Amino acid sequence: MDSIGFVCDPDHPLLGPVAERLAARGFEVALHRPTDPVTPSDVDALSALVAGERHPTALAALRYADANGVQTWNGFGATVALSARLVTLSALDAVGSRVPEVRFDGPADGYAPGRQYAWEGPATLDASAPFYVERVGIEPVDHRYYAVDDGRETHMRAVEVRTELADDDAVLQRTDVDVSLAASVRELLDRFDARAVAVDFTRGEDGAFYAVRATPTPTFTGAGMDRRVADSIASLTTIGA
């Protein structure tokens, strides 16, 4: 029986239901909390490993799995690279997305302090940031594109995420997929040899969309893609079989 390990909290909004789906399909599922150790023997017993959070325990488990032939759903390299703001902005620019300008010469009007890695806390008022990113959004909404590769094709969903609420506005709502934006997200996924990614776009003053951030541990909230994610993870067990 194929065994799939998850490093995430049991109530993870995506991987909890996905683990249940996979268990119902006959897979043996092992859940590891990020706060608990995941030993080499734990990983060796798996057919595939999934990290739901960018936590040191999850990253260490991914690194060991990649080095020892255990399939991973977004490996160590992809997870770290797509968590680095400058790397993702450069990669998104390379695949054809418009991205905000980055400055390294200190704070300036119209620029926000940046973080090198997504797991770092925000910069404090009394500390300088390593770089500053142009504020390009003019609307209180991000356009989040979710992509997941199930081993045969890449599935895409787009969700509007409101960053400011007024009256009875919904926080999340599905929206149509823009072909050009989807193409850049799909290319980003391929370049990092990842199985899943989320990219946030925002509309600039000229009406064009800017890609502002990416994450290799998407929750797919509001996308209704649990089955697609389960298919993607299950397909890892057929690689090399």
Image: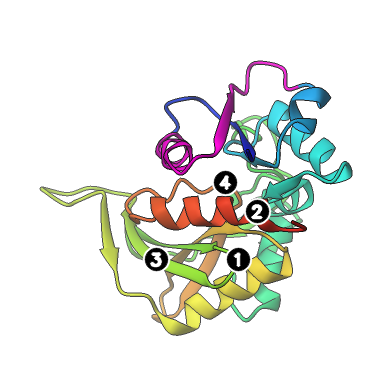
Task: Assign a secondary structure to mark 2.
Answer: helix
Q: CA distance from mark 3 to mark 4?
A: 15 Å
Tell me the kind of residue under disc 1: Gly
In this view, the mark in front (1 or 3): 1
Task: Give the residue pinned by disc 4.
Answer: 217
Mark 2 lies on residue: 236
Mark 2, other Cα within 10 Å: few <14 / some 14–19 / many ≥20: many
Given the image, on which type of amino acid does mark 4 rest? Answer: Thr
Query: Which of 183 and 40 lies nearest the eye of the viewer?
Result: 40
Distance CA(mark 1)–CA(mark 4):
18 Å
Q: Earlier in the sequence, mark 1 or mark 2?
A: 1
Q: Residue at x 56, y 71 (%)?
A: 185
Looking at the image, residue 232 sits to the left or right of residue 60; the answer is left
How crowded pointer 1 is (Cα within 10 Å; few <14, some 14-19, many 20+) is rated as some
As measured in the structure, the alpha-carbon distance from the residue carrying label 2 to the one carrying label 3 is 22 Å
First to last magenta residue range = 13-38
- In the rendered image, which residue does mark 1 sit on? 151
Residue 143: x percent and y percent? 39, 64
